[in-house]
Image (cartoon, helix red, strand yellow):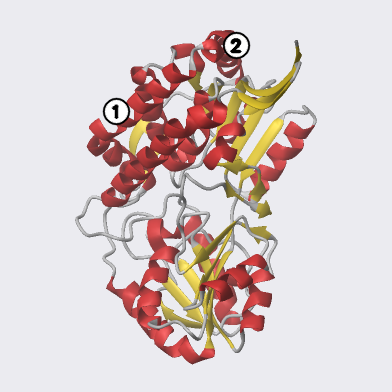
Amino acid sequence: MIIINPATEKPIADIPEDDQASVEKKFQKLQAAQPAFGHMTLPERVGILQRFSELLDTHKTHLADVLSSEVGKPVQQSLNEIGGARARIGWLAGHATTYLSEETMSVTPGMEEKISYEPLGVVCNISAWNYPYLVGVNVFVPALLAGNTVMYKPSEYATLTGLEITRLLKEAGIPDDAFQIAIGGPAVGASLLELPFNGYFFTGSYKTGKQIYEKAAAKMVVCQCELGGKDPLYVAEDVVDAAAVAVGTADGAFYNNGQSCCAVERIYVHKDKYEEYVNAFVAEVQSWKIGSPTEEGVYIGPLSRPGQAAFLEMQVKDAIDKGARLLTGGKRMDRTGYYFEPTVLTGVNHDMEVMKEESFGPIIGIMKVNTEAEAVALMKDTPYGLTAAVYSADKHRAERILEQINAGTGYWNCCDRVSAAVPWSGRGHSGFGATLSHAGLRAFTKPKAYHLRG
C-alpha cells in the first residue's frame, strides 16, 4: 500500500498490507491473550493507558509531523488533536475505577445483589482517518481499560499514525498479543467482518456503517457505529454580536477543512441578523491562510482524499444551478496537492445537495429564515442526527429548540466540540451506541447480575 502526502501528491511510504491469513493469525493471538489480559487488575490497565498518554506527549512533535504528512491537516491542528486525545485518556482512565468496578446494589438480611462488568472479549475497532487519535482513543482506550483485547484497523489514509499508536501502546505496557493492528483498505475491513469478534466498533460513513451493522447483526454481537452528520446551526435574532458569532461558527464549519463528523454543515440565520452575520462570516473565511500543513499560521491545508474535491465541486454546481449565490471559493486550487477553496454559498434551500448530503469538506450553505419555527423545521429536515447548535441570548429558548431536534448532542452558543465527560452518540443515519463518558466505558462490558443468598 502506497501512502501519499496529500499536500505534495508524492509517495511517503510503502506499507505491506494484511491479507485474510494474516488477519486470522492476529485474531487468534487476541483470542489467546484475552483471558490473561482480562484478569489483569484494573489499576494495572489504568497505569498502562496513563503511560501511553505520557508517551503521546513525549513524542508529540514527531507524531504531529507524521499525522500531517499523511492526512494533510496543519501541524498545529495535529498537535491540538494529540492534546485532545490525552485529555480524553485522562478522563477515561481517571474514571475507569468508578464505572468498571463491581457495584453492590442492594444488601438486605440474607441477600446481596451486585453487578460486575465483564469484558466483551475480543473487539474490532475499524477507525477513521479524519481524527485518527481522537476517534481511536474513543474506542480502544475504554476497550482496553475494560479488559478486552483489540484488533485495530486504522483507515488506509491514516496508516502511519495507526502504526505509531500501536508502537506506543506496546511501549506503555500493553501485551503484544492484546493489541493487534490490521493494515489495509476495504478488503481487509471486509475480512475482519468474517471473524467471530465479540464486538464491532466502527467510525466512518453511513454507507459503510450500514454494511457493517447488517453483517454483525447475524452474529448477535455488540455493534456500535459512529457515522456522519449534516449538523445544523441556528443564529437567532437575539444574539448580541452577530459578527462575533460568525467568526466562531466559521471555525466550527471549516476547522480541519470541514472534515469532521460534527462540523457545522448548514446554517440558518434569522433575517434580522442575516446580513451582518454573512458579511462577517465571509470576511473571516477570506482571512485564513491556505498552504502547506508545515507552514506556520496555515489554517486550511489540503483535503485528505483525492476524490473529495470532485464531490465538493458537484455540490457547488448543483447549488448554483438551482439558484444559490457563490460568495467565495467554489473550486479546486491551481496548485499541487488536494486543495479546495473554502466555499460559502447563500440563497440556498433544501432542494440543493449542499443542504441535504454530508459535504465533509470546506463548504457551507447559509440560509435566511423568518422565524424560529421555520428554523426548527429546517433543522429537523434530515435523516442524520449527530449534533445541532443554537446561538441565542436565552439559554431556555435554546434548550427548548434543541429538545425538538433528534440529535445525540445539543450545543448552546458553541459548536463542533466533544467532551469525554458526556456521551458521544448519533441517531438515525448518524449511527447508534455511545462512546465517552460512563456510557462509553461500559459499552465495552457485559454486565453480570449476582444474587447472593447467605
For this view, does 289 lie left or right of residue 408? left
321 w.r.t. 432: above or below: below
* Numbered label attached to residue 336: none
> Which labelled disc corresponds to residue 28?
2
What's the CA distance linking mark 1 and mark 2?
28 Å
Q: x, y (%) of residue 198? A: 67, 23
Q: Image check: 454 left or right of 175?
A: right
At 59% from the left edge and 63% from the top edge, which residue is drawn?
A: 230
Viewer-proximal residue among 434 and 392: 392
User: Could you tell whether 286 is left or right of 95 in the image?
Assistant: left
Give the SS element for disc 2: helix
| Front-lying residue, 202 or 71 | 202
Residue 429 shows up from this direction: no
Q: Position of residue 36 (x, y in %)?
A: 54, 8
Pick the quarter of the image with the N terminus. Answer: top left
Q: Nearer the viewer, residue 36 or 293?
A: 36
Q: Is residue 260 above or below residue 451?
A: below
Residue at the image position 57 percent from the left and 19 percent from the top: 23
Residue in view at x 64 percent, y 53 percent: 430
**Residue extending furthest toward the front:** 109
Residue 282 position within the rendered picture, expressed as x and y whole percent measured from the top left: 37, 79
The residue tagged 1 is 55
The residue under label 1 is which amino acid type? Leu
**10 Å neighbourhood of mark 2: few (<14), some, or many (≥20)?**
some
Inspect the image, locate mark 2, and give the three-letter code of the amino acid beneath it. Gln
Is the C terminus in the top left, top right, bottom left or bottom right quadrant?
Answer: top right
Estimate how packed mark 1 is, as few (under 14), some (14 to 19) or many (20 or more) residues with alpha carbons within 10 Å.
some
Q: Which residue reaches farthest left? A: 296
Query: Mark 1 or mark 2, which has the lower sequence index?
Result: 2
Residue 2 on image: x %, y %: 41, 34
Could you say whether the residue bearing mark 1 is in a helix, strand or loop?
helix
**90 vs 315: above or below:** above
